[in-house]
Amino acid sequence: MTKPTHSRREFVAATATAAALGVFGTAGLSAVSAFATPQPQPFVPAAGLIPYGSAVRAGALESDPAYREAIVANCQMVVAEGEMKWADIRPARGEYRFEKADAIIDFARQNRLEVRGHTLAWYGGLPDWTNEISSRAEAERELVDHIKTVVSRYRGVIPSWDVVNEPLVDFPESAASLRPSVWTRQLGPDYLSIALRTTAAVDPAARLVLNEYDVEFKGPRFAARRKALLQLLRSLRDKDVPLHGVGLQAHLFADRDIDRDGLQAFLNELAALRLDVLITELDVVDYELPGKVSERDALVARKAGEFLQAVCDVVRPKAILTWGLSDRYTWVPIYFKRPDGMPNRPLPFDADLKRKPLFDVIEQFRRRPA
Ligand code: 9MR
C-alpha cells in the first residue's frame, strides 16, 4: 500500500478530546448496553479538514488485513455498505440480528473512526417477508419498531443517519413521485415523516439525513430530480418534520456531464433551508471509459474533481465518503461490468490497494479552507 498523504495521527490527536468525552465509549461490545453511551459530542475533524470516509464490508474487514489497514490508515469515518440494512438486520419477521453491524461498530470503536448509519427507510435492501405486510397499521408498527430498536441500540455511537434513502422515482414529475415500496403502498408519503420523527424521538442528538442519487448531471431527468427533491424537502420543512441534511450519493458516470449551474442552484436552495450537505457514496462508474488504465484513472479523477469543485465552490460538505475504498470491493460490476471484461476502477485505491489519482483529488478538496 502506498503511504497516504494525510496521517491518521492528525485525526487521532484531534479526536483525543472527543474520546475523553466518551464519544467512542470504552465498554466491551458483547452486551446491548455496551452501546448505551452518553449523547454524541459534535465530531471534530482533524485540523479543519472535511472528514473522509468509506463504506465498509464486515466480511472483508474480518478476512482481509490489508484492506482493514487501508481503511484505518485513510478514513476518519465508515458506513456499513449493507450490514445495517433491513435485509441483514431483519432476516425474519420478529427477529433482529446485529452481529455484522456490531462488528463494524466494534472495528470503528477500536480504531477511533466515526460511524454513519445507513439506512432506515428505503425501498431496497428489504427482506422478502416485508412483502407480506398488508395494512397501514402493520407497516407503521414494523417501521417504527425497527427504527426504535436499531437507533436506540446505537444511540451515542452513530451521530448521523441516512434515515431516508432514495425516495424519488428515476424521472419524477413532482415531490409526489415517490418510488413504490411497501412503505409507500401502505403509508403513502407519511412514511417519510414517520421515519424521521421516530428517529428524532429515539435519538434527539442524531443528525438526520435524506440520501439521494442522480442530482448532479445535465439533462431534463436530473433537473426534474433536483426540482422534485427540493419540493419534497420544503414540504417536510412546512410540516416541521425533523431533517438536518441531504446526502448527495454522487455515483458519478464518466460519460455524464456535471450540471455545475443546476447543481449549485440546488445547493444554494439547500443552504437557504439550512440543510447540511454530505457527499455520501462517491465513486465513478467507468464501464464506458477507455481500457487503458492510466487514461481511465485520470478521467475518473477528473470527473470527481468537476463534481467536488462545483459543490465546494458553494457549500462545505460535512463529510466526503466514497462507496468503498478499494476497487477490490465495489458494487459497480453488479450493474456496470465493462464490455472488455477488464475490472472496474471506480474508487480511490486500486484492487492492490495502491492509491489512485481519485484519492488525490478528494484529498485536495478536503484540505480547502472553510
Ligand atoms: O453497494 C451495495 C450493495 O453491496 C448491495 O447489494 C446493494 C443492495 O443493498 O446496495 C448497494 O449500496 C447502495 C446503497 O445502499 C444506496 N445507494 C446505491 C448503492 C449502490 O447500489
Image: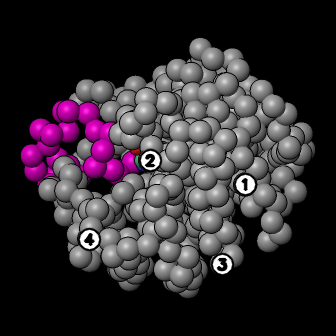
Q: CA distance from mark 2 to mark 3?
A: 30 Å
Check disc 4: other Cα within 10 Å, few if <14, some if 14-19, many if 20+: many
Check disc 3: other Cα within 10 Å, few if <14, some if 14-19, many if 20+: some
Query: First in sequence: mark 2 or mark 3?
Result: 2
Check disc 2: other Cα within 10 Å, few if <14, some if 14-19, many if 20+: some
Q: Is residue 362 above or below residue 269?
A: above
Mark 3 is on which residue type?
A: Val
- Disc 1 secondary structure class: helix
Image marks 3 and 4: residues in contact by CB distance under 8 Å = no
Which of the two residues, 255 or 239, is positioned nearer the viewer here? 255
Q: CA distance from mark 2 to mark 4?
A: 26 Å
Based on the picture, tell me whether residue 129 belongs to the magenta stretch.
Answer: yes
- Disc 3 secondary structure class: loop
What residue does disc 1 label?
Answer: 361
Residue plotted at (43% across, 33% down)? 340
Query: First in sequence: mark 1 or mark 3?
Result: 3
Residue 34 percent across, percent down from the top left: 61, 30
* Residue 288: mark: 2
Query: First in sequence: mark 1 or mark 2?
Result: 2
Query: First in sequence: mark 4 or mark 1?
Result: 4
